[in-house]
Amino acid sequence: MNARPSLDVFVSGCREALVPLLPSGCQIGTITVIEPKHEIADSAAKLFFYSTLGEPLAVAICSQTPEPTLVDRNAEFVESAHKLLPPQIAASILEPLTTGTIEGMPFLMLPFCRVLSSSRWRWFIQKTKLRGKLLIWLNQVLETSQHVPPANNCQSRVSDPLTFITGCEDLTDDTRQLAENALDRLNTNKWTPQLSLTHTDLWKGNVLLPEPNNPLLAESQNDSPFHLIDWGGGTFEGHSSYDLIRIGRSFGVPHSTMLRALYTQSEIMECELEDCLGGLLSGLGLLGMNRGHFPYNRFLNLVEDCRSFATDILRPTG
């Protein structure tokens, strides 16, 4: 079994990988290291590289285990997503500058982008500007990548996850009944699910802003209003309504705006509006069946929060 390289080895190896990518006249100055907080299988160290002028350049994410990790899956999925999607849509999926291994441990290097603000008022302005664009982007991805799954995939990606939700006694009766209703529509051929490219962990922390004048950010990506990262859990066999509800909750999207976005999804997938709720619960069921290190109580809270948010959106008014 490979011994974990020291952080000094990671810093040296990542620096060596970054230098050939720098434009003429640009040199590496300060390097800031953030070590992983927990000893888990997918833990990673992050190295932040700045120029000698103090300008942010890149972030290296270094795996702490030689086994297949989120670092590997992230790079592989992003590459496949860029091949599938049109360039103007794919530009919002942040591509690694380079990938490699350091003494058997994988790493990837991303161009530096800005995180969304923790300041209440600045965050309000940012989310107000971004949320409509994010919803439109998600439905563009759905329209480009949707497909009817074969029977075996429908079983594993839709039926089994819904059955998992119905059988989870720690969830509320309302949630379990909605999953039961979705199963009934599926089994009576009233709902034909469409699967598509999805992120599966879409929230504020995985949305970045382009860093102005970063020489390492491709021109096409610099034109995008946002960049999405952390695609290690991405899939081409996912439920678009799951991503939509997750980002809607995180960005505080008004119910009326969410309802329009869900209507658009239902039109793209040629299904009833209530079937978007079935897709959401299927996505949550998939997470529950493959929680990994995600705590059980947090999973239960996520399911109930997403279900409540979605049913409030769909509840008739007046």
Image (tube, rainbow, N blue to C red):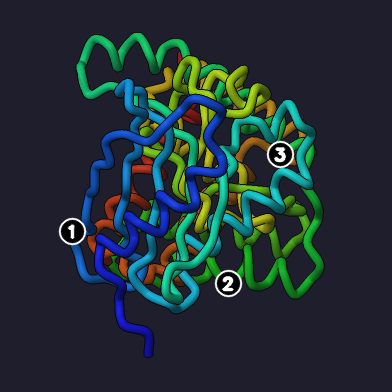
Would you place residue 115 above or below residue 229 in this image?
A: above
Front position among marks 1 and 2 = 1
Q: Which mark is residue 37?
A: 1
Q: Is residue 120 left or right of residue 63?
A: left
Q: Position of residue 277 (x, y in %)?
A: 55, 44
The image quadrant of residue 263 is top right
Q: CA distance from mark 1 to mark 2?
A: 34 Å
Rendered residue at 45%/23% (across/down): 209
Mark closest to the chain's N terminus, 3 or 2: 3
Instruction: Please identify, in this view, whether the residue under mark 3 or under mark 2 is nearer the observer.
Output: 3
Q: Within 10 angstroms of label 3, few (less than 14), some, or many (20 or more) residues?
A: many
Where is residue 172? Give x, y as percent.
31, 57
Image position, residue 296 (x, y; %): 27, 66
Give, as a three-letter code, the residue at label 2.
Asp
Task: Label 2: state its secondary structure.
Answer: helix
Q: How packed is label 2: few (under 14 Cα within 10 Å), some, or many (20 or more)?
A: some
Which quadrant is home to the N terminus?
A: bottom left
Q: Mark 1 and 2 residues: CB-CB less than 8 Å, in contact?
A: no
Which one is nearer the viewer's eye here, 166 or 64?
Answer: 64
Q: What amino acid is at disc 3?
A: Leu
Please give the name of the residue rendered at 74% of the width and 50% of the height, measured from the top-left corner.
Answer: 194
- Per the image, label 3 sits on a secondary structure element best described as helix
Relative to 84, is 54 above or below? Answer: above
Q: Which residue is mark 3?
A: 142
Residue type marked 1 = Lys
How many angstroms separate mark 3 from mark 1 (CA)? 35 Å
Q: Compare marks 1 and 2 and give the one earlier in the sequence.
A: 1
Q: Earlier in the sequence, mark 3 or mark 1?
A: 1
Disc number at residue 160?
Answer: 2
The x and y percentages for residue 313 are: 46, 28
Looking at the image, which residue is at 54% across and 47% down? 199
From where the camera sits, is residue 236 visible? yes
